[in-house]
Image (cartoon, grey):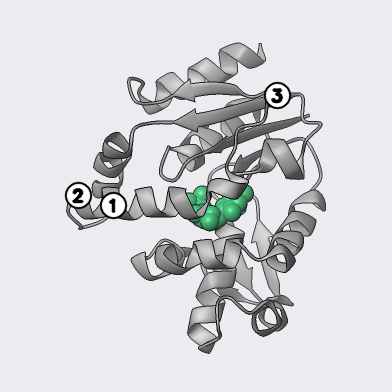
Amino acid sequence: MIVTIDGVAASGKSSVSSGVAQALGVPYVSSGLLYRAVTLLGLNAGADLADPSALLPLLSAVRLEPLASGNRVWNADHDLTADLHSTRVDGGVSTVAALPEIREWVDAQLRALPAPLVAEGRDMGTNVFPHAPHKFYLTASPRVRAERRARERPEDIPAIEAALTERDRQDTTQSAPAPDARIIDTGPLTLQGVIDTILNDLR
Ligand code: C5P
């Protein structure tokens, strides 16, 4: 069984997916972390983030460790996870995610993972796992999402909101909900409320 949970930036996908996966006793995978890892390695190498031939050679030792409690991304024996949610990575990741060669690399990593799992991202239900029997798509207004993110990062809400809106715009191509996805507005719900909505639907 595969459950896909897609949605816009900072809609709570990772926390919701982790909660759903833990309740089901299966791993979850965050596809965004792989795009973030490519971006981080590209930035650290001084590579052109729009040039796939500069990025692909950096990825041979990158590995996603999908745990129900939280994913980790490794480059050989170096744990990249703590550095993947910086403003610097946020600013470059949409450029990297627009490259077909990088999308193919990410998709191959994800499809190699054994089911059952909960897969989270932008195009899990449309592109990577189109035959998944259970699909969800999370939304919330830019302001609500910026307020949530401000609790994790020391930046002011209007700046976060502007950056999120810009990232949504850059991610539009891969971010459409699957026609058979259930759309959930997480704005009025708590984290547990979103998790319960999904679990009830699965039952
Ligand atoms: O989910 P998260 O915000 O961590 O994703 C970071 C970025 O990775 C997104 O803004 C998007 O550019 C890219 N992404 C994507 N397709 C996915 C997951 C993430 O293009 N399935």
Sequence-earlier tag: 1 or 3: 3
- Up the image or down, 134 lies above or below 43; here it is above
Give the spatial CA distance, label 1 vs label 3: 32 Å
Give the spatial CA distance, label 1 vs label 2: 6 Å
Q: Residues within 10 Å of mark 3 (few under 14, many from 20)?
A: some
In the structure shown, which secondary structural element does the residue marked by tag 2 occupy?
A: helix
Q: How crowded is mark 1: few (under 14 residues within 10 Å), some or many (20 or more)?
A: some
Type of the residue with mark 3: His
Quadrant showing the N terminus: top right
Type of the residue with mark 1: Ala
Measuring 58% from the left and 18% from the top, which residue is drawn there? 199
Write down the quadrant of residue 54 in the picture.
Answer: bottom right
Residue 160: give x, y in percent of width and height. Answer: 27, 52
Type of the residue with mark 2: Pro
Viewer-closest of 173 and 196: 173
Viewer-closest of 180 and 155: 180
The residue at which mark 1 appears reads as 162
Can you tell which of label 2 and label 3 is closer to the viewer? Answer: 2
The label shown at residue 158 is 2
Q: Describe residue 196's horizontal placement relative to residue 2 as left or right.
A: left
Residue 87: give x, y in percent of width and height. Answer: 35, 65
Q: Are marks 1 and 2 in contact (CB under 8 Å)?
A: yes
The label shown at residue 134 is 3
Residue 35: give x, y in percent of width and height. Answer: 58, 62
- Up the image or down, 134 lies above or below 106; here it is above
